[in-house]
Amino acid sequence: MKATHHLCHIPPVVFPLLVSVTLIAALPLPVAQAEPQQPFAVSHLGPHLRSAAASQLFAHTAARPPQNLTERLAPGRDSIIKGYSPTWEGALARELLAVDLRHDIIRGAVAEYQSDLMALVKLQAGDKHDGTFNAGALQDDAVTALSVAFDLAPRVQSVDVWAVVPGDETREYAHVPVFSVSVQRADFVQAMAEPRKATHILGRLGLVRFSPNYLRYAGGRYGAGHLLGLPVSTYDAPPASDDWEDHVAEAYERLSNAEPGHVNILEPLRGPHGLAALTIDDGPHPLTTPLMLAVLQDHGVHATFFLVAEKAEEYPELVRRIARAGHEIANHSYSNRRANELRDAELLAEVSACHDVVGRITGMATEYFRPPGGRVTEGGLRAVGTSEHTMVMWTNNADDWLKPKPKVIAANALEGLGPGAIILMHQGSMESFRALPLIIEGAGAAGVQLGTVSDLVAVGGAATRDMSIEDALVYLHQRGYKCDE
Ligand SMILES: [Zn+2]
């Protein structure tokens, strides 16, 4: 099962760690070792967090009870897996354990789409108390994890590795992403062709995102003030959340100087154009985005991705991949918080921050905005109007956030589907990914072609209406959207 061909080109002097990977791979794996190894997944995090994690995983795979999501590796050492493809996930767990990474692995997942496999490895970096970690060791482990995942099988076509440091101790799930990398097999093989250190390999991949938090917590052999060996292509803009109050103050200023009372709303129009829009909210997501991109590519369909900028900051390469594949990128706010939970200036700051983040990553401006949770308020409409985005709601709600079976999601999306419809679905769950081909095929069977929101506008299947805030509230209320005071 192991194919270590590209690892073998690396001379021991230059990159001893990977050679040890190769050696371990070449020998039969020891079944029982005297030396206790790091436990895989979350089993070392204590019973409370462990059951929380299991139920979180359960939420991802409603069809499987949580006890089926653990993989027995050795006495006393269970891994918790996603349950997407348990056999591959178990294999990934075993191989990662065998190479003895210096960091704990808190998540491993492998998903299958047609003949391709896509893997995800999440590493826990950072001291429990102050979050500091050794930059060199983390980069070594990231490259090793990539190697191990790609070596599982030639069918593994894309691998995501990300690392977090512990966040606020009072919040059980708080963690601070410091590093992520999303790699396609061909790029990895090319980057590994020349023997170099991990930092050079990552630099050659050019797909790495070191967050500003990385600089904050990293130490070790690269030393501070040295950019820590970061590649030139690094996306190193600070997260908008770092100086959030400044963003809000700026938005407050803009709102007080704005012409009051107008907002653009996209009105869907029936007609002979034969097109409906496919919109996917809440990404990017390290596993489901690549999977959904593969489905869309196979079917020759373009969609509009309403992205959450906070996640775009964590996975900028996935945002570039969405754009490169010809899909439309739209605005779903910075943090996915609902309008009814926010001050007006905060909502404007959310829309502006998302616009800026997407612009910095892709060079493109967002034109369309969908309010998180579909929630609308009078002040929120004024904020959206001031942001100069056109608000896009939906006509066909897949209701996939409840994670019903893919068949049910597709049936929801397809109910009454006709030209001018706007389908709303989400990314983040495997159910949504599995429903996507059913939706595309079902639309085709109903004689409806799917495209982006801009495609729909271009063929006359939707038009932007400039409305007063009062009219907009009536318009939205009449169509059943949730309007709060
Ligand atoms: Zn959302």
Image (cartoon, rainbow, N blue to C red):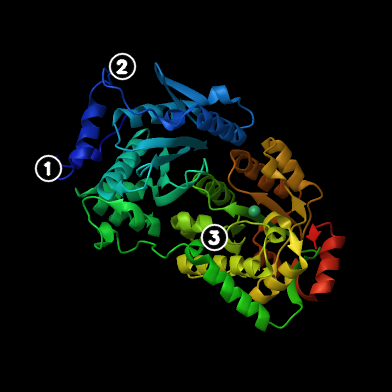
Taking depth in this image into account, of 380 and 27 the one nearest to the observer is: 380
What SS does tag 2 mark?
Answer: loop
- Using the image, tell me which numbered label, if any, was put on residue 309: 3
Residue at image position (77%, 78%) is: 261
Residue at image position (34%, 51%) is: 187
Q: Which residue is mark 1?
A: 13
Amino acid type for the residue under numbered disc 3: Ala
Q: Earlier in the sequence, mark 3 or mark 1?
A: 1
Q: Which residue is mark 2?
A: 31
Amino acid type for the residue under numbered disc 2: Val
Residue at image position (50%, 36%) is: 111
What is the spatial separation of the Cα atoms under label 2 and label 1, in whole angstroms?
A: 29 Å
Count of picture labels: 3
Q: Does the beta carbon of the residue at mark 3 sit less than 8 Å from ligand 1? A: no
Residue 167 appears in view: yes
**Residue 367 lies in quadrant:** bottom right
